[in-house]
C-alpha cells in the first residue's frame, strides 16, 4: 500500500501559475521578440524548478496537498477544488515542464527561420497549455481535473488553427468537436455518476468505488473511457491526424507534452485513484478494456504503414503507442501498471524527438513526404541520428526507453495470464519496425538527386532534438529509477 503521509504546500499552485503569469508577460512583450522569448524560457525554467523541488518529498513517500476551495458541507459535501501531488502526477509534471524548456528553444529556431506569423500568440498559447497540463497532473479530484482538462482544449485550439487557412479551421472544428463534445457527452456525466454513487470525487489510494454495484461501476467506466478523447482510442482518434496541419512544434506539444498525454494520464488516474486496481480486478472490467486498447494498438499501426506524409505517420504512431499506456494499466498487474506509467515518460521523449526531427527536416529541405527524403541521413546527420534513436525506441530496441516499457508490459501480461496480449505486444513491435525502418532506409541508403540543397536546421533546433534523443537513451538506461517511484501506485 502507498504511504498516507501528507504535507500541505503552496508549491503545486505556484508551479501551475508560473506559466499562466508568463502568458500575460509574453503578451505584454509581444512587440519585442527577444524579450517575449526570454520570458517564455525563464518561465519554463522556473516552472521546472518548482516541480523538481517536490522530488525529495515524493521520493520519501509523501503526498503533497494544496486545498483551494471547499464547497459548504450543507450544499455539496466532500466537493471542492484541490491540488494533490503523488508519484504519478509528479512524473507527468516533471516531464511536461522539462520538455517545455526544450520546445521553447526549438520553437525559436523554427518560428524565426520560417518567419511564421502570430508568434506572440503562439507563445502565449503554449504557456496556457502548460498551465492546463500541470493542472491535470496536480489535480486532487475529478472536478479539478475536468476544469484543467477542458482548459487544455481551449488553449490549444488557437495553436491547431495557427495557419489560419481553410484546412486549419476545418481541423480546429474537428478538434473542438471531438474533445469538448466527448467531454460533455461522456466525461462530465461519468463525474456526476461517480459523485452520486460514492459521495466524493477525491483521488484516493485504492479508489472510492468499493461497494458500488458492478452495473453502475461498469457503465461509469465506459463513460470515462469514451469521454477521454484526448487519449486517442479508436474510434475517438480522428481529431489527432487532422491536427497535424499545425506547425511542427505544436504537433510535438500535442503528442508529447500536453494534450494526448493528458488524456492517457487521466485514464491512468481514474483506474488507480477512482476505481482502484483491486475493485476493477474483482469486476473483470480491466481485461476487457485492455483488449479494446489492443485494437487501437494494432489498427493505428496498420494505418501508419500507408502514410507517406511524415507527420501523419508519426500521428498514427502516437495513437498506437499511447494505447500501450491504457493497455498496461488495464492489465491491473504490478508490472503492467509500471510499464503503463513508464510509457508516459518514454513516449514523451521519443515522440517529441521524432517530431522535432520532422520539423528540422522541413526547415532544412522543405520536404514533408518520406518518399522525398532520400539521402538526408548523409546531409542531415544530427537530425537523422536523433530520429534513429527515437524510431528505435518506438520499435523497442534495447537499451532505449521503449524497450524498458515493452519488457515490463510483457511481464505484466504474463502476470495477468494474458497470452493474447503478449501476442499483441509482439505483433505491434513488428508493425512498429515496418513503418519506421523504411524511413531510415530512404534516409540512409537511397541516393538524393538534390543533396547540394540539403542542410541541417539551425543550431538551436538541433540542440533541442539531440537533447531529447539523449533523454530517450537515459530513460531506457535508468528506467528502474522511474519505476522505483511507482512502487506504491502499482
Image (cartoon, grey):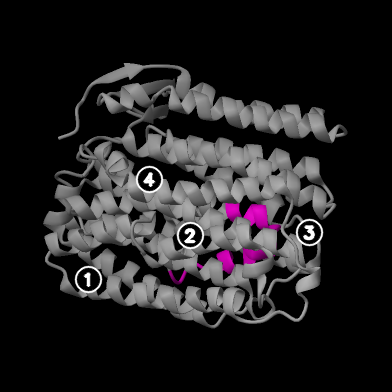
Q: In the rendered image, which quarter contains the N terminus?
A: top left
Q: Nearer the viewer, mark 3 or mark 1?
A: 1
Label placed on residue 163:
3
Instruction: Kindly identify the residue that appears in the image at 15 percent across and 55 percent down.
Output: 281
Is residue 471 covered in magenta? no
Residue 283 lies, in percent from the top left, at 15, 58
Question: Between disc 1 and disc 4, whose residue precedes?
Answer: 4
Q: Which residues are magenta?
A: 234-252
Q: Nearer the viewer, residue 11 or 485?
A: 485
Mark 1: which secondary structure?
helix
Measured Cα–Cα span from mark 3 to mark 4: 38 Å
Q: Say whether disc 2 or disc 3 marks the residue closer to the N-terminus.
A: 3
Report the residue marked by disc 2. 389
Q: Is residue 485 visible?
A: yes
Label 2, label 1: how far apart the Cα atoms are:
25 Å
* Numbered badge on residue 192: 4
Amino acid at each position: 500500500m502507498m504511504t498516507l503521509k501528507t504535507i500541505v504546500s503552496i508549491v503545486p499552485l505556484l508551479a501551475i501559475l508560473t506559466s499562466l503569469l508568463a502568458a500575460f508577460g509574453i503578451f505584454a512583450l509581444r512587440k519585442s521578440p527577444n524579450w517575449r522569448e526570454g520570458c517564455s524560457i525563464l518561465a519554463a525554467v522556473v516552472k521546472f524548478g518548482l516541480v523538481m523541488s517536490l522530488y525529495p518529498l515524493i521520493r520519501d513517500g509523501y503526498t503533497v496537498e494544496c486545498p483551494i476551495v471547499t464547497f459548504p458541507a450543507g450544499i455539496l459535501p466532500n466537493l471542492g477544488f484541490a491540488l494533490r501531488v503523488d508519484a504519478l502526477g509528479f512524473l507527468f509534471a516533471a516531464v511536461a515542464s522539462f520538455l517545455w524548456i526544450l520546445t521553447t528553444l526549438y520553437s525559436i529556431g523554427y518560428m524565426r527561420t520560417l518567419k511564421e506569423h502570430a508568434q506572440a500568440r503562439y507563445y502565449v498559447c503554449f504557456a496556457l497549455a502548460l498551465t492546463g497540463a500541470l493542472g491535470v497532473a496536480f489535480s486532487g479530484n475529478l472536478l479539478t481535473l475536468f476544469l484543467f482538462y477542458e482548459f487544455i482544449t481551449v488553449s490549444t485550439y488557437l495553436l491547431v488553427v495557427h495557419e489560419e487557412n481553410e484546412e486549419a479551421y476545418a481541423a480546429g472544428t474537428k478538434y473542438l468537436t471531438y474533445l469538448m463534445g466527448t467531454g460533455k457527452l461522456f466525461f462530465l456525466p461519468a463525474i456526476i455518476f461517480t459523485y452520486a454513487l460514492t459521495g466524493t470525487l477525491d483521488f484516493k489510494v485504492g479508489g472510492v468505488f468499493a461497494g458500488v454495484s458492478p452495473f453502475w461501476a461498469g457503465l461509469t467506466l465506459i463513460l470515462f473511457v469514451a469521454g477521454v478523447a484526448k487519449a486517442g482510442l479508436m474510434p475517438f482518434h480522428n481529431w489527432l491526424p487532422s491536427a497535424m496541419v499545425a506547425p511542427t512544434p505544436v504537433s510535438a506539444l500535442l503528442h508529447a507534452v500536453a494534450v494526448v498525454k493528458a488524456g492517457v494520464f487521466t485514464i491512468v488516474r481514474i483506474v488507480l485513484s477512482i476505481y482502484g486496481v483491486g475493485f476493477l480486478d474483482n469486476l473483470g472490467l480491466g481485461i476487457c478494456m485492455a483488449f479494446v486498447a489492443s485494437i487501437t494498438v494494432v489498427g493505428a499501426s496498420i494505418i501508419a504503414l500507408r502514410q507517406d506524409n511524415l507527420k501523419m505517420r508519426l500521428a498514427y504512431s502516437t495513437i498506437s503507442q499511447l494505447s500501450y499506456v491504457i493497455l498496461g494499466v488495464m492489465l491491473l498487474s504490478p508490472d503492467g501498471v509500471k510499464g503503463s506509467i513508464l510509457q508516459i515518460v518514454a513516449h514523451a521523449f521519443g515522440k517529441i524527438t521524432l517530431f522535432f526531427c520532422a520539423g528540422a527536416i522541413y526547415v532544412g529541405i522543405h520536404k514533408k513526404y518520406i518518399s522525398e527524403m532520400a539521402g538526408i541521413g548523409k546531409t542531415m546527420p544530427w537530425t537523422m541520428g536523433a530520429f534513429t534513436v527515437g524510431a528505435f525506441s518506438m520499435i523497442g530496441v534495447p537499451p532505449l526507453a521503449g524497450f524498458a516499457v515493452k519488457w515490463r508490459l510483457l511481464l505484466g501480461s504474463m502476470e495477468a495470464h494474458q497470452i493474447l496480449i503478449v501476442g499483441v505486444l509482439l505483433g505491434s513491435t513488428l508493425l512498429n519496425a515496418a513503418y519506421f525502418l523504411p524511413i531510415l532506409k530512404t534516409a540512409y541508403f537511397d541516393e538524393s538527386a538534390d543533396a547540394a540543397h540539403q542542410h541541417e536546421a539551425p543550431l538551436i533546433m538541433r540542440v533541442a532534438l539531440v537533447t531529447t534523443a539523449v533523454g530517450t537513451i537515459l530513460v531506457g538506461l535508468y528506467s528502474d529509477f522511474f519505476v522505483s517511484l511507482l512502487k506504491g501506485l502499482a
